[in-house]
Amino acid sequence: MGLLLKNGRLLNLKTGELEARELRIEGEIIAEVAERIDAAGHEVIDLNGNVILPGFLDMHVHLREPGFAAKETIETGTAAAARGGFTTVACMPNTRPVIDSPELIRYVYETTAKEGSCTVLPYGAITKGELGEELTDIAALKAAGALGITDDGVGVQSSSLMREAMRVAAALDLPVVIHSEDEDLAKDGCMNEGVVSKRLGLPGIPGLAESAMIARDILLAEDTGAHLHVCHISDAASVELVRWAKSRGLKVTTEVTPHHLLLTEEIIDRTDGRDANMKVNPPLRSEKDRLACLQGLLDGTIDMVATDHAPHTEEEKQRPFATAPFGFIGLEIAFPLLYTELVQQGTLPLHELVQKFTVNPANVFKIDRGSLEAGKVADLTVVDLEEEREIAAAELKTKGRNTPFLGKKVKGWSVLTINQGRITYQNH
Ligand code: NCD
Ligand code: ZN
Ligand code: ZN
Ligand code: ZN
């Protein structure tokens, strides 16, 4: 007996048209997509005219296991992913211990198999312990199933070590995923360096701390032939550098977060730097930077949206701005926020936004996901584009409450998410 989704509208990702379609799932696979399918012998779910999309992919999340279960677990983080419409997430290795060995890559796969509500693809660290001193066994990480290598949370400061990592990764055809931050320029900054940091007397992180590292790593990628993926781009000059790299035909890709597309340092000014729920790395920047990120997303310089879902405990986020940890949650609210703020405002058509959550990340990371044809794995989400609901702390599946978006009213919530043919989230 299969699962039959009736009364849905399938979004054509090429034309943007909404097409009345029924979809039949057998086991893990989409068995049939057609205007009408005989319901006999199948379990039927009525979608009430809601819109069927490929399940979203988020190439940048922090699931916090092993080691930081007070912030998040694979169980709670993937449940949040499913509620947000995600069916695949790539998780970061800045855990305790750092995911820098094949055993720890396997630990993520095994824990996900037991407790997960979506597909989880772990990254392995570039350097042992993310200490920036000694390379990991990159070939062994790949053999265990690492999607790519990254020291996210910190930048790799040594240029020669990064060059060696890229040489090895290029030979293995593994993406090198960079947290671009020059520590010598960033120092102990806690927000964007600019007029607001000066007024509040808080130490600033210049945009240069990001862009200078991206420039270095683009040149290293050209030198080594590695695929360079730039995490959480946030600065105007950074976007310009990636645009230049692409124009040279280099294998350079990048992602942007919803918060860098929608917010600026202005919100820290308004609250006089008293709320560390507005503290994130890279920091919320100027309006000029925000608009450059938006333009980069519109013109394809920026390939995809990624949340950088980074939960922390409430206790940690109640600390003073200068000493609280960096990070926002994002999985459950990314799509509704961008649907509401970009699609409904007329900045971007729905199908183009959906591409940036689906086919684009799938293509960049060579994952066979992001399309809803017969024969493909049944990873999908159904969104209600009409009902407006508040982002409510009590409804969050993540353990984190650290987001400046609590209380905001948005549309575009998922009502059903299916991962490998299994219902992982259902509401209504
Ligand atoms: C991330 C975290 O908390 O692990 N924090 C953040 O502000 N983005 C680290 C990171 O993504 O660099
Ligand atoms: Zn059947
Ligand atoms: Zn980072
Ligand atoms: Zn991160």
Image (cartoon, rainbow, N blue to C red):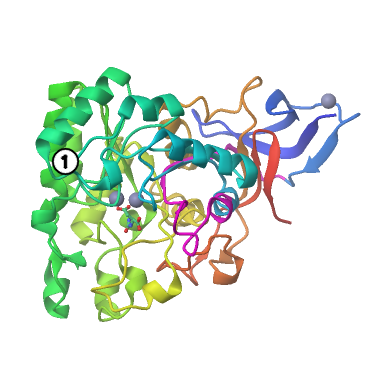
Q: Position of residue 212 (x, y in %)?
A: 10, 45
Q: Quadrant of residue 164?
A: top left
Give the quarter of the figure containing the C terminus: bottom right
Q: Residue at x 19, y 51 (%)?
A: 235
Q: Position of residue 191 (x, y in %)?
A: 21, 66
Q: Residue at x 56, y 33 (%)?
A: 17
Disc 1 marks a residue whose amino acid type is Ile
Q: Residue at x 51, y 34 (%)?
A: 16
Residue 195 shows in the view: yes
238 shown above or below 184: above
Q: Is residue 322 left or right of residue 377?
A: left
Q: Quadrant of residue 286?
A: bottom left
195 shown above or below 208: below
Q: Residue at x 59, y 63 (%)?
A: 388
Residue 52 shows in the view: no
Give the quarter of the figure containing the N terminus: top right
Q: Is residue 229 left or right of residue 249?
A: right
Q: What segment is highlighted magenta in the picture?
A: 49-78
324 shown above or below 376: below
In magenta stretch: residue 181: no
- Badge count: 1
Q: Position of residue 382 (x, y in %)?
A: 64, 44
**Foreground residue among 427 and 71:** 71
In magenta stretch: residue 55: yes
Residue occupied by mark 1: 214
